[in-house]
């Protein structure tokens, strides 16, 4: 499993509750040996990815999404 950048947002318009669930923002990030996240803050990692590859997705994927959405995609 991997943590989602926004633990309380799974689609649609980003509301205040979801925006405040950004890891490393208003709440602690992931620089820890263990973290506790809500179920909505987790996604299954595809089997073909290594742990190292999967660890880049929450930030890299969100950066790409942001570029598309804010850039007019």
Image: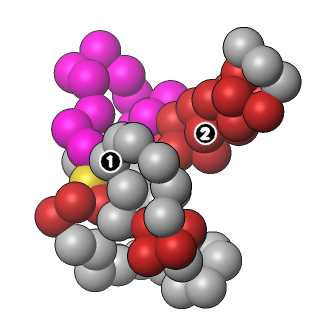
In the image, residue 28 sits, relative to residue 19, either above or below, namely below
Specify few, some or many for label 2: CA neighbours under 10 Å numbering under 14, 14-19, or 20 or more.
Answer: some
Image coordinates for residue 8, horizontal then vertical, percent = 34, 65
Asked if labels 1 and 2 touch by Cβ distance under 8 angstroms, the answer is no
The outermost residue toward the left is: 39
Q: Quadrant of residue 46?
A: top left
Question: Which residue is label 1 attached to?
Answer: 10
Q: For this rendering, which residue is in front, 6 or 70?
A: 70
Q: Quadrant of residue 36?
A: bottom left
Q: Is residue 46 visible?
A: yes
What residue range appears in magenta? Answer: 43-54
Q: Establish if 73 lies above or below 59.
A: above
Q: Say if the magenta span includes residue 50.
A: yes
Label 2, label 1: how far apart the Cα atoms are: 12 Å
Along the viewing direction, whichever of 27 and 15 lies nearer the viewer: 15
Rendering quarter of residue 39: bottom left
Identify the residue shown where x is 39% and y is 28%: 50
Is 20 rendered above or below residue 56? Answer: below
Callout in the foreground (2, 1): 1
Q: Which mark is residue 62?
A: 2
- Determine the secondary structure under disc 2: helix
Q: Is residue 64 left or right of residue 3?
A: right
Which residue is depicted at the point 54% across and 85% down? 27
């Amino acid at each position: 499993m991997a943590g989602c950048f926004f633990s309380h947002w799974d689609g649609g318009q980003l509301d205040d509750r979801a925006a405040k669930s950004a890891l490393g923002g208003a709440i602690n990030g992931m620089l820890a040996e263990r973290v506790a996240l809500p179920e909505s803050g987790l996604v299954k990692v595809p089997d073909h990815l290594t742990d190292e590859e999967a660890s880049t997705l929450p930030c890299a994927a969100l950066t790409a999404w942001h570029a598309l959405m804010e850039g007019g995609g």
